Amino acid sequence: MLSRRHLLVAGAAALAAGQARAAPPSTFVTVRDGRLSLDGKPYRFVGANLWYAAWLGSPGAGGDTARLGRELDRLKTLGVTNLRILGAGEKSPAKVAIDPTFRGPGEDYNQDLLEGLDVALAEMAKRGMKAVIYVNNFWDWSGGMPAYLRWTGNGAWFQQGDPAHPWPQFADYSARFYGDAKAQALFQHYLRALVGRVSSVTGKPYRDDPTIMAWQLANEPRPGGSEAFGAPNLPTYYRWIAETSALIKQLDPHHLVTTGSEGAKGCLEREACVVEAHKPASIDYLTLHVWPNNWGWIDPRNQPATYGAGEAKCRDYITRHVAIARTMGKPLVIEEFGLVRDDRAFAPGSAATDRDRFYGMMFGLVEADMKAGGPLAGTNFWAWNGEGRAQHADAWFKMGDKAYAGDPPQEEQGLYGVFDADASTLAVVRAHAKAVAAF
């Protein structure tokens, strides 16, 4: 494992080298005057989460390149131009974990999934789309940080939702990852292989591919769940962000790097933590997730009665993070948000009155900030189910299922994801895309 001093020195050298060499081509997304920029103009987008893109692109069992093409065409027709996709996955015994994955504890990475990522990026390029690739996960539905800890023997492994380990024990356990030297060595080896990869489809190194907008350190990295563990762990968490982002910049000076953070909700409710986490020069923009059902702001079983007060909290949460981004002089992307359907239904085409209202509110705030020249660059709704459908009567994903949906294995298929049959929600997205394109 590289020492902290080595990484910081290397990162500084990489940044200096990046300044000395030619600027990224105009087809790369950059940061200019505190906003995302593309070809000298503000880069504003409507996006979606499509974590399973590499799985569809894989030539191995379960791959479905024809479906990948259909989903990308549907999204392009909607006006979606930016996709947040998963570029990692670790073998895990968790009941809700995906399989296959990009890696196990060794260095024999899954070439089918790596080629699947190559295919996904190449197909996105044909449609003028940009990708944000996250390279780890705080949650165990893709293996993630707990899988690394299991491999290194850092405490007794357990899965999220284990009743013997009530919340916030899982979050405290997963957050051990940042300070585990062996886990970091394993992670950095994969990171070097991924960021340094040459596409098997285009023959182009990833670092030279403008289809990639940004590398993201992880999905929802948190310093911990409890104050007792998380507060003392903050320096280690900040150091991990600084070192990992510097390493990526060393490997790839052309692409943006960001955290994948939820904002204050994933930072022990501390806005100061949000600032510190996004302070390094190697972190180009801030991220924000908005989950009113999960956070107890809107009761999913009594949504109409609790929606109004919950929406007000969401508006305030977004407003406060826009202010942080403006103060820091960095762009902001709302890269996850969602709300359950009416009566917590899962079926495609089910009524989504409050969800549509919620999407409309989110999009309206973004449009207003864009019009005012603010730091908000775009959104990625969670998530695109497309033609994916639950394979079981209870709507739960089972390990080995191949009909992927945007709802990850830890949730019922259809809980938050948007199906191709969800006409009312698709109309809201389409109208927003038209508004953004007009700026």
Image: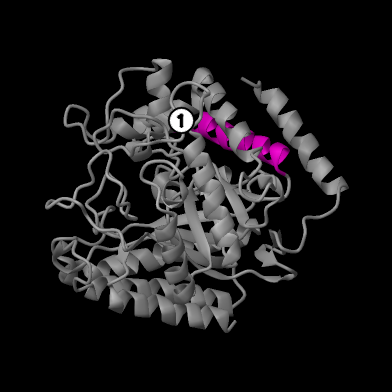
Q: Position of residue 213 (x, y in %)?
A: 61, 56
Tell me where residue 195 appears, x and y as whole percent: 63, 39
Q: Which residues are magenta?
A: 231-252
Does residue 330 appear to the left or right of 407 in the view shown?
right
Question: Residue beneath label 1, please?
Answer: 103
**Residue at x 85% of width, y 52% of height:** 22
Farthest residue to the top: give it. 153
Left of 183 or right of it: where is 169?
left
Task: Answer with left or right where residue 187 lies relative to residue 394.
Answer: right
User: Measured along the vertical axis of the image, is residue 66 above or below residue 267?
Assistant: below
Label 1 element class? loop
Helix, strand or loop for the magenta stretch, by majority: helix
Q: In the rendered structure, does residue 206 fall within the stretch colored magenta?
A: no
Q: Is residue 363 above or below residue 209?
A: below
Is residue 25 visible to us here?
yes
Instruction: Establish if 342 lies above or below 222.
Output: below
Sort mark 1 into few (<14), some (14-19) or many (20+) by Cα contacts within 10 Å.
Answer: some
Disc 1 residue type? Arg
